[in-house]
Amino acid sequence: MRQEQSRLTTMVPVAALVPGESPRLQGQDREHVARLAEVEGPLPPILVDRRTMQVIDGTHRLMAAVLKGLSSIEVEFFDGSPADAFLRAVEANVAHGFPLSQADRRAAAERIVKSHPHMSDRAIAQTAGLAAKTVATIRRLTSDGAAPVRIGLDGRVRPLSNVAGRRHVAALMAERPEASLRELARTAGVSPATVADVRKRLQRGEGPVPTQPSEPRPRPQRPAPPTASVLEKLVRDPALRQNENGRRLLRLLRLNALGVKELSELGPSTPPHCRQLVRQLAQQYAQVWSAFAQDL
């Protein structure tokens, strides 16, 4: 066993290793395996789950070793849960020279949001190689419920709600009215600004927690997008393709073939001053299509 770049590695028989679960939706790339097999000298060590001997990162390198007829390969062992192993696999595949596709990264982020709900959007974005806004959208579409806290890139734990912290501050103020804002903030685990706001609210005779607004109306469920096969069937129909009105209809159908994910990404990126106008147009277009469907 030897230490390289602060990592302990060891040589392991190729026959003892098992290809693990890959974040690549399309599986392994044989051309990349062939390129690796032509490399002179040793390849970087692969990452292997010590419990199962499954490869977490480095399946291409393992396949290249088999292609070259090698009997052993350099391994760095990983000790942790299957969910954490997948997290490491995504981090490694995003970082090295054969990166994941956009679809691979989105699918990985969806899985990480479910397996590690406490991770912040920025932390997951850095792991999966996505924008934090994209991860926020994925979380909104896929999460059944939010974790009470989030762990950021700096490793600090931040609660999503400071209701309990505000009430704790109010109790501390009653017990220690002479305590400073910073002292109360440090004890209650909230920001000094939150402590100052609680103090002002109490001085005005209000409660420590701002009055919650009425329950927001549930967001309407978007209808499932039509399957691509239906559109392709229409596109192949000569009765539509061979006349101008039919071709116009096909162009309109193609322009409107947006799925739930595409629309959910367009919404947050729309400038605030444009949203009302876009909303009105979207509603008008929906009414036009609804009337057209009724005519049909």
Image (cartoon, rainbow, N blue to C red):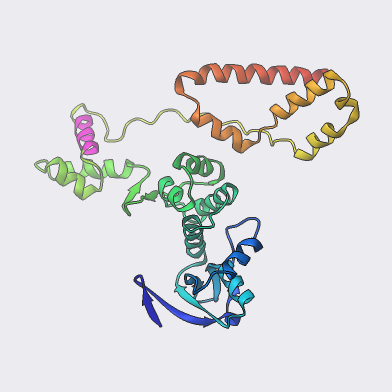
Q: Nearer the viewer, residue 124 or 156?
A: 124
Up the image or down, 130 lies above or below 270; here it is below
Residue 219: percent from the left, percent from the top? 56, 31
Q: Quadrant of the N terminus?
A: bottom left
Count of number-bearing discs: 0
- Position of 207 compared to 129: left or right? left
Q: Quadrant of the C terminus?
A: top right
Q: Is residue 240 visible?
A: yes
Up the image or down, 167 lies above or below 37; here it is above
Identify the residue at image location x=30%, y=35%. 209
Q: Nearer the viewer, residue 13 or 271?
A: 13
- Is 221 magenta? The answer is no
- Position of 16 compared to 247: left or right? left
Q: Nearer the viewer, residue 168 or 41?
A: 41
Residue 40: percent from the left, percent from the top? 52, 72
Prevailing secondary structure of the magenta residues = helix
Q: Which residues are magenta?
A: 193-202
- Is 198 magenta? The answer is yes
Identify the residue at image location x=75%, y=27%. 253
Up the image or down, 261 lies above or below 90; here it is above
Residue 115: percent from the left, percent from the top? 51, 56
User: Farthest residue toward the right?
Assistant: 239
Q: Is residue 296 visible?
A: no
Identify the residue at image location x=63%, y=36%. 260
Residue 169: percent from the left, percent from the top? 22, 43
